[in-house]
Image (spheres, rainbow, N blue to C red):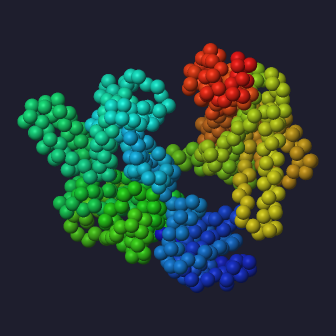
Amino acid sequence: MPGTAIILTNIRTPMYKIPPELKKILKKVSTLPGVYKMIDKDDQIIYVGKAKNLRKRVHTYFQNGKTTLPKVTVMRDKVVNIETTITRSELEALILETNLIKSLRPRYNVLMKDDKNYVYVKIDQKEDFPETHIVRRFSRDGSTYFGPYTSADSILRTLKALQKIFPYRSCQGEITEVTPGNNIFKHLSRRAPCLDFYIKRCDAPCISKITKEEYHKHIEAICTILAGNYHHLEKDWQEAMQRAVHTKEFEKAAKLRDRIQALQVLSEKQYATLTSGHNQDVLAVAKDKEHVVISLFMVRNGHVVQTEHFNLSDYAKGTDPAQIISAFMQQYYVDATSLPKEIVTSIAIPEKKLLEDFIGGIKGQRVQILLPERGERKQLMEIVEENAKLQLESSKKAWEREYMFTTKALEDLQKALKMKKLPRRIECYDISHISGTDKVGSMIVFIDAKPATNMYRTFTVKELAEGINNDFASLQEVLSRRIKYLDANYRQKKKRRKEKSDTVSLPQVPDLIIIDGGKGQLSSVIRVLKAELKAGTKATLPMIVSLAKREEEIFFPGKKEPLLLEKDSPALFLIQRIRDEAHRFAISHHRSLRSKKMIRSRLDTIPGIGPKNKKKLLTTFGSVHGIRDATMQELVTCVGEKLAETIREQL
């Protein structure tokens, strides 16, 4: 668990000499409870931990001659600064530590791998006719959430099965009940139901085919099933079906029969049924030299209703299993939508009472962490442990493929380009236009061989006149603006170091820049960047290459002969993927600009008409022709006298 004591091994590490600056910092560390942050030379927080006694805990990392795990030695050698935050109690320190790990994701903490890809089901029951949403984040906005789920496909299949039982709407847009039997579908003027109504996948609240009360009964049943508490529903429906048959309501009885059959299909995936009827989560860990997997079985009312498998970060592989499960629980239950009364683990947990108080405090209920020794819990734990081992084995091929396309590809690229360090951050630039019109540039970013879409940027080429086709000049403008931005942040970084301020957030400088094009595009870009350097730019330029499409040739500045990589090289696959992504992103933005131009209304050319007035006019009169045919009094009523006169004059 992040912040717990490091388990010593029999590996004897070399003598470690604490740097003088770090020694001064260690002397000032408090003996109170709190959180500590390890910081490297790039001002990046690489580890976060908590302690009951900060000084005692932090000093264990730097005690000379002690035997430690190799991973701790690697981390320790990178530490140049330590920051601490004092808290009032160890529990408060644990809460702060969990929040910091969640937001900062330090490299050397045990982390849930790819946890941003987990999904939730969101249902806002405050709406008159709620929708079901698949979302990536859990937020406390008053909606009902279920999850997290590791497989979006799996939960989508479940929702489709539920739609057969309870025909809920899958369309977007708010439906409001004005009076019983009179619903309004906002943002859409619908007079007939969609196809879902005719194939019995929706009861068409958009045209008032179902009341608000009946629809909410469907939603409540869906929530009950997603929460895993659905086994009493089958009994209730069986009784209702018998009553319907007795009263000769055969259509109603048939619907209930279909619901029961669909519910039985949903429950076929269960692994076990416990006679005790407990609500519990069962956790087991499986690990080898390279990877770690946590398996979680959710048991509700004695039935296993959900199974999930979580991959953990590489740093977890050298950690004690008890610490791994503890770290997982800290991160998982912060965003989990339900909390059982019992959490059963395959191994004894250190600081069990502290973790119980922390997890129970999240939902405001009591929770107990148990280590099973016999009986039903022990039998179920053996099943979970076996599943964790099977998941670890089945995931190895996927991890091998990921390694080929990420780490191996970067290592090969570093070797091929003769770079001093691994190109962890790669930027690629491309230009898109049609005969020199609507010229745009794209910048896409790959970090550790994976797309970082939140860092993608688009550039509108401003310096070239419309209609002039010059990719060289367009690239020069885009790269010039980019290097100026990097230079501005370089100066901020220098100022920050001088003032020792933490207020400036700096973007990462790319290790490698790829230009989509040949030798000419590369030469033009190098020319403008050299001009920027002469003009006083202080930012250090990364390696810059271009990739020509015909033969996939890689050109270097100042070299006549290009580099040709092997056709099956992981490095070639990587740079092709990066180049193609830059091309796709540039074309998408270019098409978006052209589409906006094509759908511009005549109203956009009239002074004084903004988005709100435009929407009001089109809603009232339907079209520009309708506005033109409107009377002066109708226009005045809609937008006021001054703007009405302008419209009459322009149209």
Image position, residue 137 (x, y; %): 49, 50
Q: Residue at x 82, y 36 (%)?
A: 476
Q: Residue at x 63, y 22 (%)?
A: 633
Location of residue 429 (image quadrant): top right
Image position, residue 93 (x, y; %): 52, 74
Along the line of sight, which residue is nearer the eye, 483 or 170?
A: 170
Q: Is residue 441 left or right of residue 176?
A: right
Q: Is residue 483 left or right of residue 292?
A: right
Q: Is residue 224 visible?
A: yes
Along the line of sight, which residue is nearer the eye, 416 or 343?
A: 343
Asked if 313 appears above or below 346 in the picture, the reply is: above
Location of residue 475 (image quadrant): top right
Work out which quarter of the rendered image holds the C terminus and state it.
top right
Q: Is residue 320 left or right of residue 243?
A: right
Image position, residue 38 (x, y; %): 63, 70
Q: Residue furthest front?
A: 633
Along the line of sight, which residue is nearer the eye, 593 or 10?
A: 593
Q: Is residue 226 left or right of residue 92?
A: left
Q: Residue furthest right?
A: 534
Q: Residue at x 32, y 52 (%)?
A: 227
Q: Residue at x 59, y 24 (%)?
A: 618
Along the line of sight, which residue is nearer the eye, 100 or 46?
A: 100
